[in-house]
Amino acid sequence: MSARPEVLVVLHDVDDNLNELAVPLAEAGLRIVTWDVERDPDGAPTVDALERFSGIISLGAYAGVTDEAKHPWMTHEKRLLERALELGMPTLGLCFGSQLLAAAAGAPFKPSPVPELGWTSVRLTDDAAADPVVGALARSSDDGEVDVYHYHFDSHELPEGAVLLAETNGIIEAYRLGDAAWGLQFHLEVGLATQLAWIAGGRRVYEREGVDPEEHERLSHENWRRYREQAHEVGAAFAQQALSYAKRG
């Protein structure tokens, strides 16, 4: 590993980048290395080369895990996630990344019982409070629930052996695999500017699903500061996991 520990960030679509999670990683002294699966397919690390990294983050995507046959990068990324799980490397999946991480661990795909668009409240489980990463969200909540930003139609079953950390009406919202891998179904990385852009671009989708886009614009304006602080705390906690892993090397 290099003198400065590196975290691999897998970018699937340019409008969903690391966003609010970039700063806490950089503040911790980590180097962020981005693989853009669509625009730089040759930039993918080999499975063997994954060992140079101290963590991996898989972001959201328009694609779904059932579209693997259409996207060669997805098969390779799944292998990277499988290898990260084998190594016990700190791993974070966000929305699609959470779904692909679950698939890499052998969990079956399923559609989300309802689409989750914009702001929803998720219930943290008792295990969340003691979790080294998601615990940061639990500490920000007074009643065991937290408001988060979503944009997804897919879901998955809980991987075997995983610990459920948050749920909403049967939808898996957060889980931990082993000691070093986390999946978050919501977009903790997405800040105010991106939220507003997604709502504007998805207005017809919101309306089709009976969701009021103007209400969620209002909620974004109300929630952005606290959400940014929550993202920073979770990002800092994940960064510490990566730094601890780097010391093992």
Image: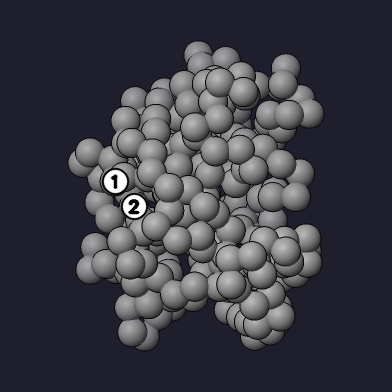
Residue at 46% over, 54% down: 185
- Name the residue nearer the viewer: 136 or 240: 136
Q: Check if mark 1's residue and mark 2's residue have beta carbons within 8 Å.
A: yes
Residue 61 position within the rendered picture, expressed as x and y whole percent measured from the top left: 62, 43
Disc on the earlier residue, 1 or 2: 1
Circle 2 Cα neighbour tier, 10 Å, few/some/many (<14 / 14–19 / ≥20)? many
Number of disc labels: 2
Q: The residue tagged with tag 1: helix, strand or loop? A: loop
Q: Which of the 4 image quarters holds residue 162?
A: top left
Percent from the top left, x then y, of residue 42? 72, 17
Look at discs 1 and 2 and give the one toward the viewer: 1
Residue under numbered circle 1: 158
Name the residue tied to disc 2: 175
What is the three-letter code of the residue carrying label 2?
Tyr
* Mark linked to residue 188: none
Disc 2 secondary structure class: strand
* Residue 201 visible to the viewer: yes
Q: Looking at the picture, which amino acid does disc 1 mark?
A: Leu
At label 1, counting other C-alpha atoms closer than 10 Å, the crowd grade (few under 14, some 14-19, many 20 or more) is: many
